[in-house]
Image: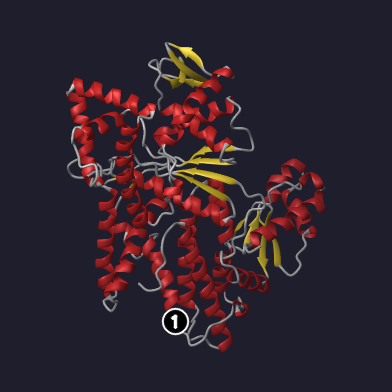
Amino acid sequence: MSDPVVLLADRFRHALVAAFGPEHAGVDPAIRPSTHADYQANVALGLAKALKRPPRDVASAIVSALDRGDAVAEVEIAGPGFINVTLTSSLLSRELARVAATEGAGLEHAAEPERVVIDYSSPNVAKEMHVGHLRSTVIGDALARVFEALGHTVLRQNHLGDWGTPFGMLLEHLTDGGADANGQSIADLNAFYQAARAKFDADPVFAERARQRVVKLQAGDESTLALWRTLVEASRHHFNALYRLLGVTLTDADIAGESLFNPMLPEVIAELEAKGQCVLDDGAKCVFVPGYVGRDDKPLPLIAQKQDGGYGYATTDLAAIRYRLATLRANRILYVVGAPQTQHLAMIRDAASQAGWLVPPARAEHVAFGSVLGADGKVLRTRAGANVKLVELLEEGVERAAAIVREKNPELTDEERSRIARAVGIGAIKYADLSSDRVKDYVFDWSRMLAFDGNTAPYLQYAYARICSILRRADESAPASAIAVSTPEERALALAVLAFPTVVVDVAASLAPHRLCGYLYALATTFSAFYERCPVLKAATPEERRSRLALSAVTAQVLARGLDLLGIEAPEKM
């Protein structure tokens, strides 16, 4: 236990049972931070209605039964029945020492760890990644880091678009000499894709050859597969370079493209038919899920197999969820996919439940997100109206950060400046995305995201670097056991530090990384207030100095750990 909320919640539950009986053991004490004390429990107001008793009487009974021990210094009933709680300084000191002694900054593994499949990033082979891939990649990676930090087994799934009809025209264009198969770069492949598309649209003979090439690909023709592997390999190198620059944890081992599921599609259809879940409708084999209708109010189908015998995205997604549940043994599946796919993914989830694949406690959840907008309020694009290439966006962020770092700290070496500029530039882009409520659109604004004040990555990175500077300038190191919480600013900082585990658990439950961002910003501003009012290096006594040094160090530990969960570096110098 590091967050006192956990301890208080446990003691309040025991008090509820002691005061009103075991039937109230599951009642949420509703403990929240308070401006009047350390925490406030709002349980009495709701419970009073069920008990048909005055709220203050209920609060009084709870307080009388509360085991204060060495944790609770003061308890006060306020207003209509709120219970204000002030903790002992000894508890805060003890728990801060516990945080400092752990590598995870107080995080503990879940009591019942799960196998969590996270489907994210998912670029298309033979297409360069653009800004539209940013949100899925950084949100998915942050969630993967959070779940792993809590002891869950995370199975990353990079669902590459590496199969299907478009590859017919790409491969046929390749056989026509449309590219150098051996030295093809992804930038060339972008132009290559556009040329293949234009030829497909304009030349009926080529289009027919492309369709026949798809048949060969799906049939496993070795020469066609060799060409296909050329495109996949060139794309994979591009993706990996971007993932390294972006600082995400995806590797080749996480690739689970559409091609992986291609051999499974016939057996998926056969199983659905055997279960009576797949029916013939207008020549196509369809799965109908109750509750989904089209614009004409007719039942909306998932087309499992087309009239011509081909398969579409729905078939692949059905095979994927079946594979993740049966083979990967997932308890929880997260689809980090844009909001426009909400209905489709809901139908896949419900079809999997209907087929008996998705059975509680296993569940599948859509981690939807909005768009990245330009200053005009429209989806971010270049001046020419094209998609913004992700690599160019990231490189511009690093360049802009380098100029700012050079101005703020000209004494840095070139190597230091380069390293810090990369951490700041990439961190700024990722944090601007993660700090926004993911379900909403947000406006991409360089000046705001690279600012050293406000809720930005540079502000948090600078707060961490400032603490590191304080610790470097100190002529001693202080153990966490030296922490003695006495001033209001020290108490506020201690409580902020100790809230970290509960915030991370909440992020895993809510799938909302912006809550961790908000917490880290609040922690940094709380440290700033502490630093302004509580001298550290020039503290009044040696004991006070060591205490504040140790409190600063544990704050830095939590800041760095929190940024790491977001996939953002924390430089020790800025």
Q: Position of residue 113 (x, y in %)?
A: 63, 50
Image quadrant for the C terminus? bottom left
Q: Residue at x 63, y 53 (%)?
A: 110
Exactly how many numbered labels are in the figure?
A: 1
512 is higher (above) or lower (below) than 408: above
**Residue lying farthest top?**
282
Q: Is residue 206 visible?
A: yes
Q: Position of residue 183 (x, y in %)?
A: 23, 47
Q: Amino acid at mark 1?
A: Arg
Q: Does residue 464 appear left or right of residue 270 in this picture?
A: left
Q: Position of residue 295 (x, y in %)?
A: 40, 18
Q: Residues within 10 Å of mark 1 (few under 14, many from 20)?
A: few
Name the residue nearer the viewer: 488 or 5.
Answer: 5
Name the residue nearer the viewer: 569 or 75.
Answer: 569
Q: Residue at x 35, y 51 (%)?
A: 240
Q: Does residue 338 appear left or right of residue 324 in this picture?
A: left
Pointer 1: what residue?
472
Q: Position of residue 359 (x, y in %)?
A: 62, 32
Q: Residue at x 19, y 20 (%)?
A: 204
- The colour scheme used here is secondary structure
Query: Residue 69's quadrant in the figure?
Result: bottom right
Q: Residue at x 18, y 28 (%)?
A: 199
Query: Residue 464's quadrant in the figure?
Result: bottom left
Question: What secondary structure is marked by label 1?
Answer: helix
Image quadrant for the N terminus? bottom right
81 is higher (above) or lower (below) than 2: above
Q: Is residue 346 visible?
A: no
